[in-house]
Image: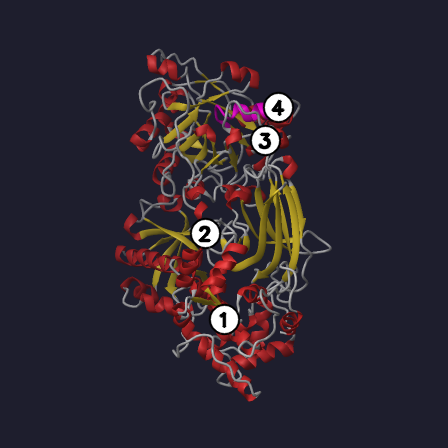
Amino acid sequence: MHSLQNTLRKGTGSRWGTVRRRGSSLTCSPRFNLFSYQCIVACRYTAAAEAPRFYDLLTAQQQSAGHRDDPATDGRVTTQQMASTGNGLRSQGDDNLQAMLVGAMMRKIKSRNWKKQRYFKLEDDFMTIWYQSKKTGNVRSTFSVNDVEAVREGHQSEVLLSIADEFPPDRCFTLVFRGRRGNLDLVAESAEEAQSWIWGMRKLIENVENMGEREKLDQWIGEWFKKADKNNDGRMNFKEVQDLLKMMNVDMNEHHAHHLFTMADKSQSGTLENDEFVLFYKMLTQREDVLKVFQEYSVDGQKLSQSNLEDFLREEQLEGDDIQLHAKQLIECYEPSDKAKRMNAMTFDGFLMYLGSAEGSIFNPQRRGIFQDMTQPLCHYFISSSHNTYLMEDQLRGQSSVEGYIRALNRGCRCVEVDCWDGANGEPIVYHGHTFTSKILFKDVVSAVGNYAFKVSQYPVILSIENHCSVEQQRVMAHHLNHILGDRLLKTILDGKAPIRLPSPEDLKGKILVKAKKDGGLEQSLSGMVEDSLNGEVSDEDEAAEIDEDHPHHESIHCRLKKSKQRLSKELSDCVVYCKSVHFTSFKHSRIHSKFYEVASFTESKARKHLRDAGAEFVHHNSRQLSRVYPSGFRTDSSNFNPQEMWNAGCQIVALNFQTAGEGMDVNDGLFSQNGCCGYVLKPSFMREADVRFDPEMPQKRDHYHPVVLTVQVISGQQLPKVNIKEDSIVDPLVRVEVHGVPMDQAKQETRHIENNGFNPMWYDTLHFTIHTPELAMVRFVVEDYDKTSKNDFVGQYTLPLSCMQQGYRHIHLLSKDGTSIPPSSLFVYLRIKHLE
């Protein structure tokens, strides 16, 4: 608290770090002293009705020191319990949830041969499921409702399909977890019991999704309380609080921790109960960084008038559209005090809630939905694409699963890969050929694609087929595509006339396209000249062919992936319309001979070579037709390259291993997080126009060259997750800001690291980047745990396009390595993007 008082005494200073008060010197007014400050900050994310009780706690001490202040908020209602209790209240009267509270014996299924009985029960917090086996007695495992993404009913997993003859679908269901965690397949004792759990889980998931910011935070606090309450008596003594602080990444002086503990212990029992712990947490999370900003625009230190808020939105957040209306809406939406609302004002509590909301985040909400023109040819879009989609792990011994397709499609992927080989009983199979990966049926893949293709996006899905099958099994493939997909499979051109360019995503809504080899072209198909000659040649997968070309002396690989030549069946050829796979010869050959519906595939090394040797030609090629780029076959661990370098060339189908977390997938997820997460992002105009030559190696030579300077001040972090399982380990966080773009824009800068503080570290470090092609730039914020003797540990990240950034004071809500949210972990930053003169 001394640092706050020192800051308040200093008066004016730079906008980048100290308080600046407009119109008068900044001093502690009689109505805003330290106790008022504690009250306002401690009430963050709480309803106005909760503020007075905490204010009373502080005021009692204040009055004993001879101070008398009025509360900043109104109302005298009893403090609510934590958000978990709120969930319980919302759940009363729901028969399904009541049944879950009682619990049920169900079978947990891992395979056809592994079926174990477990007792599952919903805990009273309505946020935790625990289960135990008969053998282990009191040993329990738990998972949070927060971790569950969806519930699938019936035989909708490979595991449950494998036991379909043993258990009927009305007793089976699957819990799908967020990130890359495996599913939980369950079989209930009866159909009624299964329905209770299916609908009950869906209700709980809906409750979580509908939580407000305050409820989410209080629920998070409640989870920590339960972790720390070792003896489960609903109270925490000071020793338990000390242990909890270590668990929460807080390295706090014992005297100060005990002082806060005593203040929160209203009952003077020597322990903290639920609501007392909430108050303790809120004293712990004082936001001096946000208070500085609030003070800069507040006249009396307690509130922002609507006019003050308009000034803030105009000067700091750089908003220009109807600021008066927007300020009014923000007060109505985020201000918890009815009294302040009646005054058209915003208290610090409301200001903090606004800055922590989606509107106050770094990502521009106007870019969340579909905002781009979706009527241009397919080749004018970057398309979210997956490589070896069937794999769940590495590409030598990993598991193949239809789950890979389901997960990719549910993440907005619009191009999936299917490696097809002859299987037993005349049924084609899918796996990574000549390896020890497991095998799945082609028809099961097609069924999964048919079921999940359009769950999250209505725009077209491309099936990229690597065909190694005999003519007989190719005919079976064509039968499955036609029979399972029906009208969703695109079999003919859209309007019956010879087209001159690719159709648009809008034209192809709800359609599944096949990308594969084809006899002849669209012209012959229209004229009916293609015969069932069986002379069409099907090469081995492009990946193997390119490995042989790049490494002709690599005998082991050459033998393992030896090219085979198969004939092509007319039935499968007829399934290909706008995405005919062809071998790439040269850019000159393509200019003269290539058709707009032909798609060439490049391994990452070949794409890099073309980019180095003829970048402008590559971009021009991709303005007319589709290109696919995929990871090298030598990436046996299924790692990824950075897709940005391929987008720099205008390549549309940049295929990544979706099952592998890391920088490549972070950048990919970041690009496709805009435009409704629909899987299509419109390329910049200079990459779409045939008469424009853009060279990513020399971006300054293009017309309308407008470089910008990105300035990022990293102010603070909040509740960073613990990465080291050792109890006494506290994070030493640093923030790295990375710019991914054309070669001239590639850059990384770091803040200093903060020792022993993962809870509320403060940096106020400023970083500057010059960006020559802002239209292509992606910005990645990475938090790491600094280690001077070994590689830093990953803590969290967030990636987004520069074009989607909001300027001003913004929170960045961090994501885990798997790309899932980790609330309430965030960074607080100040951003400016200025054009170079």
Answer above or below: position of 433 versus 291: above
Answer above or below: position of 245 versus 830: below
Tell me which numbered mark, 4 or 2, is placed earlier along the sequence: 2
Q: Position of residue 232 (x, y in %)?
A: 47, 75
Residue 461: in magenta span: no
**Badge 2 density bin: few <14, some 14–19, many ≥20, Cα 10 Å:** some
Q: Mark 1: which secondary structure?
A: helix
The alpha-carbon separation of the residues under discs 4 and 1 comes to 60 Å
For the residue marked with disc 4, what is the amino acid?
Ala
The alpha-carbon separation of the residues under discs 4 and 2 comes to 42 Å
Between 433 and 410, the residue placed more toward the observer is 410
The alpha-carbon separation of the residues under discs 2 and 3 comes to 30 Å
Q: Which residue is mark 2?
A: 178
Q: State left or right for residue 749 relative to residue 296.
A: right
For the residue marked with disc 2, what is the amino acid?
Arg
Q: Mark 2: which secondary structure?
A: loop
Q: Which residue is mark 3?
A: 604
- Residue 225 is marked as 1
For the residue marked with disc 3, what is the amino acid?
Glu
Tell me which numbered mark, 3 or 1, is placed earlier along the sequence: 1
Q: Mark 4: which secondary structure?
A: helix
For the residue marked with disc 1, what is the amino acid?
Phe
Answer above or below: position of 576 versus 74: above
- Is mark 4 in CB contact (under 8 Å) with mark 2? no
Q: Which residue is mark 4?
A: 614
Between 715 and 223, the residue placed more toward the observer is 715
Q: Position of residue 230 (x, y in %)?
A: 52, 73
Q: Residue at x 37, y 27 (%)?
A: 477
Q: Position of residue 486 (x, y in %)?
A: 30, 31
- Is mark 3 in CB contact (under 8 Å) with mark 4? no
